[in-house]
């Protein structure tokens, strides 16, 4: 049924057992029941009319991450909804099927509000997706499941804690769909998981591990929906805000066996100086947290005997979607955007820092134009998951990539499987140059302002963000 309002609220929930945990969340009434951060489901082309009631004691917003909407409905910090106020959203969904999400986006407070719970998932469906669902025969909610993954810093009294303007907020507890120490009973069969990393800052490297080996997995979709074809992968890099649609086959496992969804270890490359040493102590504010890049168990999968009689194994189609080929960008204007830190440890995009240099649009692009944006990270830096509002883009190329990324290349231009679809968030690794193709074909009139920022929320809140205008 249709939802007409989301209320930004604060209430206590039993998450960890024992003392209740106060969550800031989007509350909704659905069929007489109250739910928190509901998973929303919509069809492509559907009109969304919804009001946001802010019952927090500070400004908030609801941003539709990944959706192509006009500025008034984008829910960025340019349009804060004051404490006690209400704002209506009214837009049509023009995105492909896929897993998107919604979250708060008030300037300087995004990290604090998301850490406390202001985020939920949005599933969009269309014809192509329904056809695939028919072919796969994996029932949503049974063998097709969203996994919303976040880490939280939780104290001894079960309170979620946060310090403003910390660098890289990482947690000591992992929650999958708001559940600590999660496990899932699985049949020895094929499953579809829609992974979403909604952590503040933790980059994940998810893999399904059985007896120390990664189970084969097929990547079938990214932020903006299905890929053209499934790509076999063993693991992925899933940065904050990124989504991945994967198929995993447990049919070689016997009832009683277990597999783990685990984030594998990787070289975090966080602020390393030439000697490879960390500048600040990244763990000082994070008691009990697993360091960035260290292995981290996310969820257990317990294989059980199937209740239903065995069905014939699922045939995964070789073609998932009709995806347009990468555009020929010959002659498109190129905009260079450089990610860097100044000598006081403040992040910049070119010479812009949203808080230090102001909120005015950094540049404008013409409606209907197409541009190449070339993002370049410094050598001594961190991986930055860069997110652009208002559209989905295509990744054209990656160069000077670190070995772990170079090793994933499956296509021209140094592209890995996750680069081959539509995306709204892309990781720029230290030293890398990543080129994106953007098409500013938009139906709206008048100037629309959007954000480009690092989705490491502490970087964003410290000003690693710009606004740009489409005119
Ligand atoms: Cu997911 Cu600007 O946000
Ligand atoms: Cu966004
Ligand atoms: Cu960053």
Image: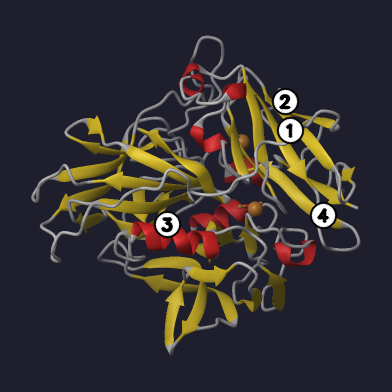
Mark 1 to mark 3: distance in Å?
A: 29 Å
Q: Residue furthest bottom?
A: 32
Against 34, residue 273 (above or below) is: above
Q: Which mark lies nearer to you, 4 or 1? A: 4
User: Is label 1 in a helix, a strand or a loop?
Assistant: strand
**Around disc 4, counting alpha carbons within 10 Å, would you say few (fewer than 14), some (14 to 19), or many (20 or more)?**
many
The disc, 2 or 4, on the residue closer to the chain's N-terminal end is 2
User: Is label 2 in a helix, a strand or a loop?
Assistant: loop
Q: Position of residue 199 (x, y in %)?
A: 48, 48
Mark 4 to mark 1: distance in Å?
A: 19 Å
Q: Which mark lies nearer to you, 2 or 1? A: 1
User: Is label 3 in a helix, a strand or a loop?
Assistant: loop
Marks 1 and 2: in contact by CB < 8 Å?
yes
The residue that mark 2 highlights is: 342
Against 190, residue 413 (above or below) is: above
The residue that mark 4 highlights is: 449
The disc, 1 or 3, on the residue closer to the chain's N-terminal end is 3
Q: Which mark lies nearer to you, 4 or 3? A: 4
Q: According to the image, what is the colour scheme of the structure?
A: secondary structure
Q: Position of residue 326 (x, y in %)?
A: 67, 36
**Left or right: 4 in relation to 160:** right
Against 345, residue 15 (above or below) is: below
Mark 2 to mark 4: distance in Å?
A: 26 Å
Where residue 427 sits, quadrant-wise, is top right
- Residue 348 is marked as 1
Q: Position of residue 82 (x, y in %)?
A: 71, 71
Q: Evaluate whether residue 91 shows in this view.
A: yes
The residue that mark 3 highlights is: 160
């Amino acid at each position: 049924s249709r939802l007409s309002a989301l209320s930004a609220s604060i209430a206590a929930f039993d998450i960890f057992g024992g003392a209740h945990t106060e969550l800031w969340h989007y509350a909704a009434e659905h069929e007489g029941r109250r739910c928190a951060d509901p998973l929303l489901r919509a069809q492509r082309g559907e009109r969304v009319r919804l009001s946001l009631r802010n019952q927090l004691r500070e400004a908030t917003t609801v941003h539709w991450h990944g959706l192509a909407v006009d500025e008034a409905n984008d829910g960025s910090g340019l349009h804060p909804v004051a404490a006690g106020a209400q704002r209506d959203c009214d837009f049509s969904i023009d995105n492909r099927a896929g897993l998107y999400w919604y979250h708060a986006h008030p300037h300087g407070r995004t990290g604090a509000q998301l850490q406390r719970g202001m985020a939920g998932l949005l599933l969009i469906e269309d014809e192509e997706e329904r056809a695939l669902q028919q072919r796969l025969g994996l029932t949503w909610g049974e063998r097709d499941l969203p996994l919303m993954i976040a880490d939280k810093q939780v104290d001894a009294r079960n309170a979620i804690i946060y310090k403003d303007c910390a660098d890289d907020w990482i947690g000591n507890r992992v929650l999958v769909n708001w559940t600590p120490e999660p496990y899932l009973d699985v049949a020895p069969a094929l499953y579809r998981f829609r992974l979403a990393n909604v952590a503040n800052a933790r980059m994940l490297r998810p893999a399904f591990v059985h007896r120390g080996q990664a189970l084969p997995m097929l990547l079938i979709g990214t932020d903006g929906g299905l890929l053209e074809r499934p790509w076999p992968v063993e693991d992925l890099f899933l940065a904050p805000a990124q989504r991945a649609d994967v198929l995993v086959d447990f049919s070689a496992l016997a009832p009683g066996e277990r597999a783990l969804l685990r984030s594998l270890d990787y070289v975090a490359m966080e602020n390393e100086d030439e000697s490879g040493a960390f500048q600040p102590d990244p763990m000082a504010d994070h008691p009990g947290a697993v360091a960035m890049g260290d292995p981290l168990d996310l969820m257990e999968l317990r294989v059980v005997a199937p209740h239903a009689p065995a069905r014939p194994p699922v045939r995964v189609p070789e073609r998932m979607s009709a995806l347009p080929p990468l555009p020929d960008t010959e002659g498109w204007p190129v905009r260079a955007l450089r990610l860097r830190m100044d000598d006081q440890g403040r992040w910049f995009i070119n010479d812009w820092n949203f808080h230090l240099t102001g909120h005015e649009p950094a540049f404008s692009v013409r409606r209907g134009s197409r541009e190449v944006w070339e993002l370049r990270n410094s050598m001594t830096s961190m991986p930055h998951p860069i997110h652009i509002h208002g559209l989905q883009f295509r990744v054209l190329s990656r160069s000077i990539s670190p070995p772990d990324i170079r090793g994933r290349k499956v296509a021209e231009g140094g592209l890995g499987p996750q680069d081959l679809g539509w995306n709204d968030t892309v990781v720029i690794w230290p030293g890398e140059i990543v080129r994106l193709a953007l098409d500013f074909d938009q139906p709206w009139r008048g100037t629309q302002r959007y954000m480009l920022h690092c989705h490491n929320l502490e970087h964003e809140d410290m000003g690693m963000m710009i606004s740009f205008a489409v005119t």
